[in-house]
Image (cartoon, grey):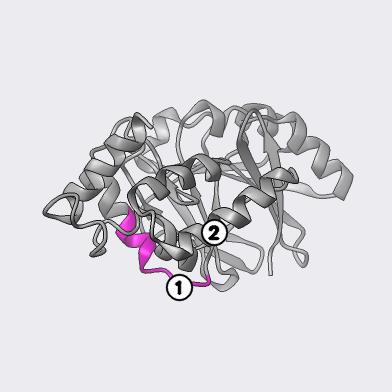
Amino acid sequence: MLDIIQIPVLIDNYIYLLHDTVSGETAAVDPALAELVLAVLKQRGWQLTTILNTHHHGDHVGGNVKLKRHTGCQIIGAKADSHRIPAIDRAVSEGDLITLGSHSAQVLETSGHTSGHIVYYFAEDNALFCGDTLFVMGCGRLFEGSAEQLWQSLQKLKTLPVETRVYCAHEYSQSNGRFALTVEPDNIALQEKMTVINQLRANGLPTVPSTIGDELATNPFFRADSPTLRTIAKTPVEVFTTLRRLKDSF
């Protein structure tokens, strides 16, 4: 399995370090800042070889240039977003594979939050690094894409194995869960999930990762085609659009 280190930064961001113990290769996913990444690398004796960017927002690419200058790492990002990814070396698209030692990840295009958003799915490691497309009990805001685009992007992620761990880029779980309970107050799985979430946060612990299975049971944006939520609108896309609009003002 990959060694995965979670680094909290800024107010609610997560940077992830992925390390292959055999080859010694290490990747940073969405490094908002360089300093903490360099500190953890030094502490563990790891050498950064790769940066994986999911999209161009500053709190995901802010450390790119400094990390590349200090380590000589390769920066990978979406071809559709390559003009906005600082110091990008390799532009990737749907279905491309990236490797980290003996580990490989499939690139999936997930537009909606931004027009060029991608995610990285390490199938053999049961790990999905999804940036701001999918959150614990939530999804990204629509900054550039449409609700239908983001809904279709989430359909791709819903088909992944239920044991897939969901490593999203923000700690939004409590707010997302409170909103989810307003639209599905009788969802027992959601109620139980929120009990765990609140306990974790009360102890200063992260609520990430989740799993695809958990999201199928508790995330209203994953569940827009469920009978309990279909009362909101006629079609799943319309349900999703309504949910996203309600969450924006929650």
Residue 76 in sight from this viewpoint: yes
Quadrant in the picture for the N terminus = bottom right
In the image, residue 158 lies in the stretch drawn in magenta: yes
> Horizontally, is 3 left or right of 168 in the view?
right
In the image, residue 17 lies in the stretch drawn in magenta: no
Residue 48 or residue 193, whichever sits in front: 193
Q: Position of residue 224 (x, y in %)?
A: 27, 56
Relative height, residue 4 to residue 123 (above, below) = above
Give the extent of the magenta segment: 154-163
Identified at 47% across, 29% down, the residue is 57
Relative height, residue 227 to residue 12 (above, below) = below
Residue 185 figure quarter:
bottom left
- Number of marks drawn: 2
Residue 98 in sight from this viewpoint: no
Q: Using a 10 Å C-alpha cutoff, classify the residue at mark 2 as few (fewer than 14 neighbours), some (14 to 19) or many (20 or more).
A: some
Residue that badge 1 annotates: 161
Identified at 63% across, 29% down, the residue is 11
Residue 109 or residue 9, whichever sits in front: 9
> Horizontally, is 119 left or right of 18 in the view?
left
Label located before the other in sequence (1 or 2)? 1
Q: Which secondary structure lies at badge 2? A: helix
Residue 210 figure quarter:
bottom right
Q: Position of residue 213 (x, y in %)?
A: 47, 68
Quadrant in the picture for the C terminus = top left
Residue 147 or residue 119, whichever sits in front: 147
Q: Which secondary structure lies at badge 1? A: loop
Q: Position of residue 23 (x, y in %)?
A: 75, 63
Identified at 67% across, 29% down, the residue is 33
Residue that badge 2 annotates: 193
Q: Position of residue 186 (x, y in %)?
A: 38, 60
Amino acid at dot 1 = Pro
Residue 74 or residue 16, whichever sits in front: 16
